[in-house]
Amino acid sequence: MSYHSNADLGGTAQPGAIIPEAEGDLFHAPWEPRVMALVVAMGPTGMSNIDMNRSARETLPNYLGSSYYEIWLSALEKLVAQTGVLGDAAPPARRVLKAPMVLAAIGTSTSYSRPPTQAARFTVGDHVRTRSGAPKHHTRLPGYARGKIGLVQRVHGVHVFPDTNAHGQGESPQWLYNVAFDAAELWGPQAQRSIISLDAWEPYLQPA
């Protein structure tokens, strides 16, 4: 059974119009800032990492019918249940986020770059083919770009690998590349002429 990500919508037909929102409209209901606060507070506890959060959100059965912060809340509830952090034998929190620390925590970015332990397999100008088939786990390689040929146009260095990090199997740092694809390669000959670029970790790629 393959892993299904509700967020993998590229190339699929979606009903209804896309309605843009006014710039700066951060919240739409009084409960939404509270959900954001809960998610921010749980981050330092070590209950989950960014890839676990993405995986929990993308596999929600009500994903497509939920608002942004409804997805956040449902995923948080899912992770709390999976990890047992509210149970009698809850693991100790790695760190507790106190009120005076919140603004600094929100304003501090987290680096997922890691030092290399081996040479990169590909370099700028290499033609590569992405891994085909749907995996049985969380992945950041979108469905529309699987089994496609592209050109490496940038080497980002080594970064945490989401496919293992999402399942508590360690960071397993991998080389990360920016790969450019012709739109026709992704969408077929009917696609408008354009170049689509996406970032792909080395295990997603093979020589073309």
Image (cartoon, rainbow, N blue to C red):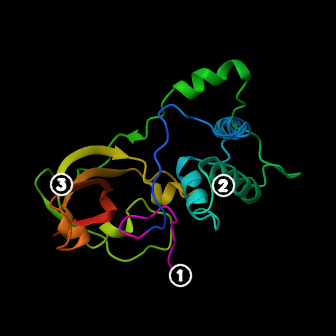
* Neighbours of disc 3 within 10 Å: few (<14), some (14-19), many (20+): many
- Whole-number angstrom distance, CA of label 3 to CA of label 1: 31 Å
Question: For the residues carrying marks 3 and 2, which lies nearer the camera in this image?
Answer: 2
Mark with earlier residue (2, 1):
1
In the rendered view, tell whether residue 31 sits above or below residue 99.
below
Magenta stretch in the rendered image: 1-13
SS at mark 3 in the image: strand
Of residues 44 and 8, the one drawn nearer to the viewer in this rendering:
8
The amino acid beneath tag 3 is: Val
SS at mark 2 in the image: helix
Asked if the magenta segment contains residue 160, the reply would be no
Q: Position of residue 3 (x, y in %)?
A: 51, 72
Q: Which residue is mark 1?
A: 1
Q: Is residue 121 visible?
A: no
Q: Position of residue 103 (x, y in %)?
A: 61, 22
Mark with earlier residue (3, 2):
2
Give me the disc on residue 75. 2
* Neighbours of disc 1 within 10 Å: few (<14), some (14-19), many (20+): few
